[in-house]
Amino acid sequence: MKPIGPLMWEHRLIEKMLGVMMRHMDQAEADKKVNPVVIDVAVDFIRTYADRTHHGKEEEILFRDLAIKELTTDLKSTMQELLDDHAWGRKTTAQIVAAKEMYLSGDEEKLTEIINLARELGSFYPRHIEKEDKHFFYPCQEYFSQSEQEKMLVEFWEFDRKMIHEKYNKVFDEYGRL
Ligand SMILES: [Fe+2]
Ligand SMILES: [Fe+2]
């Protein structure tokens, strides 16, 4: 298997999850209220799975190794765009969390902000995935030999293995602050 394989499978789950989140936002708009759990579950998925686990492998392994290759100008600039997209996703997720906190404190007007931000994220992210799937991953893998690809895949599995422990250590730290 090639290292881009697991990254592409992860894209499929992220797309499906965002699709469900978009449907929840349509429902919230119709009901003029949102169940905060709907936001919390989406935020946890985005932060733990899409950002830490998925972007983690992209940024800390794939992009790290690409940075020392002689990439074409096009690929270099696409990689920068992808990093900027990840940063935008983190910022937008934090904005959703902040709006939800204010909504829970009684500011009902924050509902529109939550819906708009979640929709922005839900419509932006599939374009990011398309950029990677169709214009980045395949040309990138040409820069790696068979053995480099095998090593990368092993590093991906090791990265994933650590995630569940990192996640629940974080849960433990936050639980103490509740
Ligand atoms: Fe990405
Ligand atoms: Fe990705």
Image (cartoon, helix red, strand yellow):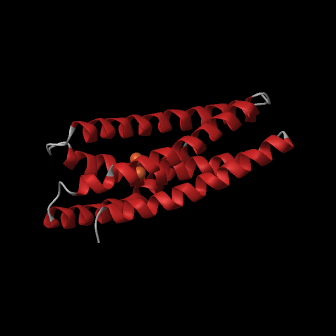
Q: Is residue 40 something one can see in this rendering?
A: yes
Figure check: 9 above or below 125: below
Residue that appears at 56% across and 50% down: 44
Q: Where is residue 150 in the image (x, y as percent from the top left)?
A: 20, 67
Quarter the N terminus occupies: bottom left
Which residue is more in the foreground, 56 or 170? 56
Which residue is more in the foreground, 30 or 129? 129
Quarter the C terminus occupies: top right
Return the residue found at the far bottom: 1
Relative horizontal placement of residue 63, taking residue 107 as reference (left or right) = left
Quadrant in the rendering for residue 165: bottom left
Q: Where is residue 80 in the image (x, y as percent from the top left)?
A: 32, 35
Relative horizontal placement of residue 136, taking residue 121 as reference (left or right) = left
Q: Is residue 51 something one can see in this rendering?
A: no
Residue that appears at 84% across and 39% down: 32
Which residue is more in the foreground, 52 or 70? 70
Which residue is more in the foreground, 38 or 2? 2
Quadrant in the rendering for residue 146: bottom left
Q: Where is residue 129 in the image (x, y as percent from the top left)?
A: 45, 50
Q: Position of residue 29 (x, y in %)?
A: 80, 41
Residue that appears at 66% across and 46% down: 39
Relative horizontal placement of residue 127, taking residue 149 as reference (left or right) = right
The total of numbered circles placed on residues is 0
Residue that appears at 50% across and 61% down: 12
Return the residue found at the far right: 31
